[in-house]
């Protein structure tokens, strides 16, 4: 990833404009689409054509004067606070996120259906566990990773351990979502995501020491981020928790914005020897669920991030190189959230369409009679449901032997799983029924 060119400093630009008598002209640009449109970093703006009659430096001066941010208690090494703005692009994304995840408006039926929601929940938790680990370098196939989680077998290597840790952490976050964030809870999260993966096991669940400082660099050694000294971390962690719990600042911050900034905060402080990225993303989920965005139980942001990891990393760099302007990271993450919500809806619609198609095909398959087709249609929507002969007999108004033949036939073809409950035969709808019915 190429390091972006740092913008010219505002005092320099002001001095230039004043000396050249150009301030009146610069001020005319303040409220025009050229300055309030796309939220461009200097590294991109300098490659665009400047407004007629202006230099790129004058244009950038107008852009900087037009932007105003709200500060938070996170500061850099010089004590300069980070701040964020809410341009129209962010507000639009937040509106879409609210519509898609805050209430029950247009939420897919399989997620509100108690019989099927767990299947989608587990699938989503697996997806986030795998892709979040892959963002941190875990190397394994999705099939192997899913087998690891489903079977509960022991991880074979560090990559598999990372994935299993992430899955367990995401499950635990659902239990912790109503708790306030404390340093102890942050440490608990870090222990979970790093369990049995650190060179020094004692580094789990504690802040890094001064001799453990890690810079963020590429393979060539170019440093992208030099985090704060270890002595600043305890106070920084307390301030981060206060922010996460809404204690600071005094003014209202949209819950999704707070979650994104919490993600950035931990990643910037880099308080742990390893596992900072996974911990930061986990805190994002805690914050969204804590604020009532319950649909984020089913959403994987890492799946979207993994498709454009450079864009993710660059949003950090844009923030640090342009006066601690968090708006760049906020814009990038708001888009990620909106895309992740959209992908969830598309995925469930696709699965719903597949189920309907199967139901239609079942009607034309000569293997099954109409009573068996009804059972299969019901079983597709109610994984884990138990069918007994007497109930099927009564529902279909047929003889006992006919009802027994129906259910035994479905078990013989692998559609239902036959089990014993005392002396009674029970037929269970398998979780993977849809896959079993595929040709």
Image (cartoon, grey):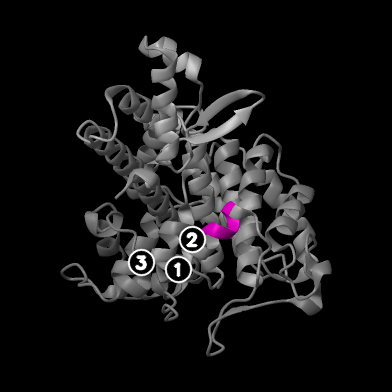
Farthest residue, direction right: 202
Instruction: Using the image, determine if residue 184 lies above or below residue 61.
Output: above
Left or right: 277 with respect to 15? right
Q: Which region of the structure is painted magenta?
A: 146-150
Residue 170 lies in the magenta stretch: no
Left or right: 340 with respect to 232? left
Mark 3 near mark 2, Cβ–Cβ under 8 Å? no
The Cα atoms of the two marked residues, 3 and 1, are separated by 17 Å
Query: Residue 414: horizontal and vertical position, in percent?
Result: 43, 41
The part of the image, by quadrant, that contains residue 29 is: bottom left
- First-in-chain label (3 vs 2): 3
Residue designated by label 2: 325
| Residue occupying the point 38% across, 19% down | 402
The Cα atoms of the two marked residues, 3 and 2, are separated by 15 Å
The part of the image, by quadrant, that contains residue 187 is: bottom right
Query: Residue 166: horizontal and vertical position, in percent?
Result: 62, 56
Residue designated by label 3: 61
- First-in-chain label (2 vs 1): 1
Instruction: Using the image, determine if residue 22 lies above or below residue 288.
Output: below
Query: Residue 225: horizontal and vertical position, in percent?
Result: 58, 75
Between residues 131 and 234, which one lies in front from this camera angle? 131
Residue designated by label 1: 318
Between residues 199 and 225, which one lies in front from this camera angle? 199
Instruction: Using the image, determine if residue 209 lies above or below residue 338.
Output: below
Between residues 263 and 113, which one lies in front from this camera angle? 113
Instruction: Using the image, determine if residue 201 lies above or below residue 248.
Output: below
Query: Residue 269: horizontal and vertical position, in percent?
Result: 66, 64
- First-in-chain label (3 vs 1): 3
Q: Main secondary structure of the magenta part?
A: helix
Tag 3: Cα neighbours inside 10 Å, few (<14), some, or many (≥20)? Answer: many
Regarding mark 2 in the picture, which secondary structure is present there? Answer: loop
Mark 2 near mark 1, Cβ–Cβ under 8 Å? yes
């Amino acid at each position: 990833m190429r390091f972006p060119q740092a913008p010219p400093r505002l005092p320099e630009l002001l001095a230039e404009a004043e000396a050249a008598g150009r301030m009146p002209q610069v001020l005319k640009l303040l409220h025009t689409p050229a300055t309030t449109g796309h939220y461009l970093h200097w590294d991109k703006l300098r490659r665009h054509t400047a407004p007629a009659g202006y230099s790129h430096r004058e244009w950038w001066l107008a852009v900087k004067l037009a932007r105003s941010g709200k500060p938070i208690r996170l500061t850099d090494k010089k004590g300069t606070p980070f701040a964020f703005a809410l341009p129209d692009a962010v507000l639009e994304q937040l509106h879409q996120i609210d519509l898609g995840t805050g209430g029950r408006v247009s939420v897919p039926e399989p997620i509100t259906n108690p019989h099927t929601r767990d299947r989608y929940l587990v699938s989503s938790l697996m997806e986030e566990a795998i892709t979040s680990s892959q963002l941190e370098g875990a190397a394994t196939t999705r099939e192997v990773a899913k087998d690891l989680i489903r079977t509960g077998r022991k991880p074979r290597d560090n990559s598999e351990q990372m994935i299993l840790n992430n899955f367990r952490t995401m499950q635990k976050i659902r239990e912790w979502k109503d708790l306030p964030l404390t340093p102890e809870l942050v440490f608990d999260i870090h222990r979970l995501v790093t369990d049995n993966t650190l060179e020094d096991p004692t580094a789990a669940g504690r802040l890094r020491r001064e001799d453990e400082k890690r810079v963020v660099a590429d393979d060539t050694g170019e440093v992208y981020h030099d985090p704060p000294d270890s002595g600043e971390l305890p106070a920084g962690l307390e301030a981060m928790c206060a922010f996460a719990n809404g204690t600071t600042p005094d003014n209202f911050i949209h819950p999704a914005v707070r979650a994104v900034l919490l993600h950035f905060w931990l990643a910037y402080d880099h308080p742990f020897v390893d596992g900072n990225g996974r911990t930061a993303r986990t805190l994002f989920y805690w914050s969204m669920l804590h604020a009532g965005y319950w649909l984020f139980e089913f959403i994987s942001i890492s799946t979207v991030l993994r498709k454009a990891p450079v864009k993710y990393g660059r949003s950090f760099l844009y923030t640090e190189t342009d006066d601690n302007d968090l708006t760049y990271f906020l814009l990038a993450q708001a888009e990620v959230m909106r895309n992740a919500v959209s992908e969830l809806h598309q995925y469930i619609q696709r699965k719903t369409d597949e189920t309907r198609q199967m139901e239609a095909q079942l009607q034309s398959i000569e293997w099954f009679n109409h009573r068996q087709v009804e059972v299969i249609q019901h079983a597709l929507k109610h994984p884990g449901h138990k069918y007994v002969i007497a109930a099927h007999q009564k529902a279909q108004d047929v003889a006992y032997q006919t009802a027994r033949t129906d259910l035994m036939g479905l078990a013989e073809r692998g559609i239902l799983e036959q089990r014993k409950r005392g002396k009674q035969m029970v037929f269970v709808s398998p979780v993977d029924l849809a896959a079993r019915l595929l040709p």
